[in-house]
Amino acid sequence: MTAPSLVRATRVIGARNVLRLRRSPDLIAVVAVQPVLFVLLFGFVLGGAIQVPAGDYQAFLVTGVLVQTVVFGSALAGIGMAEDLERGVVDRFRSLPVPRASIVIARVLSQQITGALGISVTAGCGLLLQWRPHGGLAGSLAAFGLLMLFGLAMSLVSVTIGCAVRSTEAAQVACYAWLFPVTFVSDAFVPTDRMAMPVRLIAEWNPMSAVTTTVRALLGDGAPAAGGWPQEHAPMLALGWCAVLIAAFLPWSVHVYQRRTAGRSRPTSAGRAKGGAGHGRCARR
Amino acid sequence: MTASGSIVIEGLRKRYEHGRPAVDGLDLVVPGGTVHALLGPNGAGKTTTVRILATLLAPDSGHVLVAGANLRTHPHLVRERIGLCGQHAALDHRLTGRENLHMLGRLAGLSRAAARERTGELAERLRLADFAGKTVADMSGGMARRIDLAAAFLARPRVLFLDEPTTGLDPVARLDVWELVGELVAAGTTVLLTTQHLDEAERLADAVSVLRDGRLIANGTPGELKRQAGGPRLEIVLRHPDQRRPVLSVLETLALPGITTGDRAIVAHLAATDPLALLGTAVRALASAGVEVEELALRRPSLEDVFVAMTSEPRKHRQEERSFT
């Protein structure tokens, strides 16, 4: 019997994360139902009132929802991390002879699988509604690659938050809430050119806008809006943002994770009490 | 397996960021193949000690050997030799018991086939088969705890840490866990358990350490600790409080070492020599005095009495012998 390698430990923990997802109706809702809802809601309710440069709002919308799906999905990485920390699952893993990095790596990689699933559901939903990518196979693959890269970057942000907060409930708010303004103050659903000034500036420089604009170009979904410098340099900006986020949050997430598990402060009584309540919940069933 | 599972702790110290030391110079030796209970009130340092020994927490100072591996220089070796069962069942609630065990077995270093085989073996031996297919969320606390114990035991650890293994369990589930721990020990595993329940320590442990404020204040077998609390006691509960005086005068004629009284209750400490003869004398004297007695019992001091005395009194026990017998 030998201690598992990093690859094996990551695979085992990652497989467990994916299995866990399949058992979780609430998580499936986030990954699979939410994008469909957004496509329908914006496509049929709000879309009629929105003017887009290329004229086809359906195409504009599907790419927006693709990026949004990846971004919202990344919140699950942090929430899952917070839950494992709170429930003592991380402690159990750490008491086993597994390389400790595997816990964080598995969390981010399994999120990538979830992200790919969300992209597929959204694209499938778009295809049903007559949306078609026009950028050829290369364009579609490049768009998929960029979405996955952005998802990875955002998962690292999310894991950092998940390790920093003290409870799963806090993580649900902290990993999610800020994503709403980030997705709406961007050109994911509405072109930025009609936004009022300070908001417009934020939206134009929003990493999400850079990614969305680039994905739109790669999928050939209409000409990009005549915008400022950020729109004209969207591909470079999108890759740059991903690089910056990964460069910042990869080491930061590791740092926060180590700080959290180093046990410098006494375990919170709140966490313990909740663990006890959890038992009660089990017992009542 | 037996001899290599010992735990040696010297001068262990740990202080959290804000506050007094949680573990303050702990020395302890647990011989391989024995069960040792760490007993103490909340905040005594029990869980902190276990978390350090399980490599979850770095100590500030001290020298620790777990199953022959140095905690500071070879933590990965320690992890290969221990099993940990924390205060709450640290299982994935959305996975079944069997899936949890398989995953943890794989992470403990078992091959896929070995993990499957060992999971089946434990499920049968620990009578988990009936519910191992349920998700942990659908289990009772007792079932989850059994799975948790099985998980800690998957890779046949030499040393098993159990942090309050029966907290939050109903009495039946507690008995179940005790039985399980007994089986594990029979296989030669060293067990270090923390508990606030004295009956648990009494039932399971070969030796008991009482902790307070991160220090060891007593150490010995349950029997030795009880002897420290003195001889047997005669406990009398009267029907009428006003009959206390005649009872006390009867007891005084017997020249007992100490008597404490409550409203209706009287506890007389007997010299350990011949408690039965004293009991007979006392009963006859009480009957002839016409006292109405509701309850009368001869009781050895429980570990509870020892515990209460040691953890509530000011620090005079601190100088208590620390030798291990």
Image (cartoon, rainbow, N blue to C red):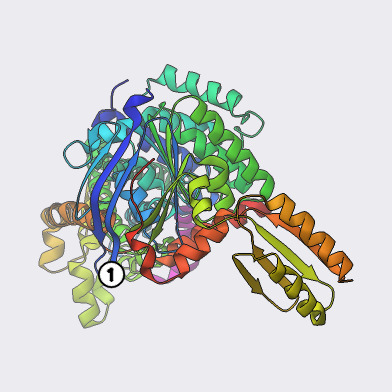
- Which residue is at the front of the view, A115 or B247? B247
Camera-nearest residue between B55 and B117: B55
Q: From this viewpoint, is residue A97 visible?
A: no
| Residue B94 located left or right of residue A137 | right
Count of numbered badges drawn on the protein: 1
Would you call the spot at circle 1 few (<14 residues within 10 Å), some (14-19), or many (20 or more)?
few
Q: Quadrant of residue A255?
A: bottom left
Q: Quadrant of residue B263?
A: bottom right
Looking at this view, is B28 or A45 the one in front? Answer: B28
Vertical comparison of A136 with A29: above or below: above
Residue B293: percent from left, percent from top: 84, 67
Q: Residue at x 39, y 40 (%)?
A: B325
**Is residue B268 in view?**
yes
Relative side of A27 to B71, left or right: right
Residue B122 sits in which quadrant? Answer: top right
- Name the one closer to the observer, B234 or B195: B234
Query: Is most of the magenta stretch helix, strand or loop?
Result: helix
Question: Is residue A47 magenta-colored?
Answer: yes
The kind of residue tagged 1 is: Arg
The residue sitting at 39% across, 29% down in the picture is: B157
Residue A34, compared with residue B127, is above or below; it is below
Residue with the mark numbered 1? B20
Q: Position of residue B58 (x, y in %)?
A: 23, 51
**Magenta stretch containing residue A115, yes or no?**
no
Residue that appears at 49% across and 30% down: B185
Q: Along the horizontal axis of the image, is A169 left or right of B244?
A: left
Q: Write the start and end of the magenta stretch as one range.
A: A33-51
| Residue A113 higher or lower than A192, as above or below | above
Q: Is residue A13 left or right of residue A140?
A: right
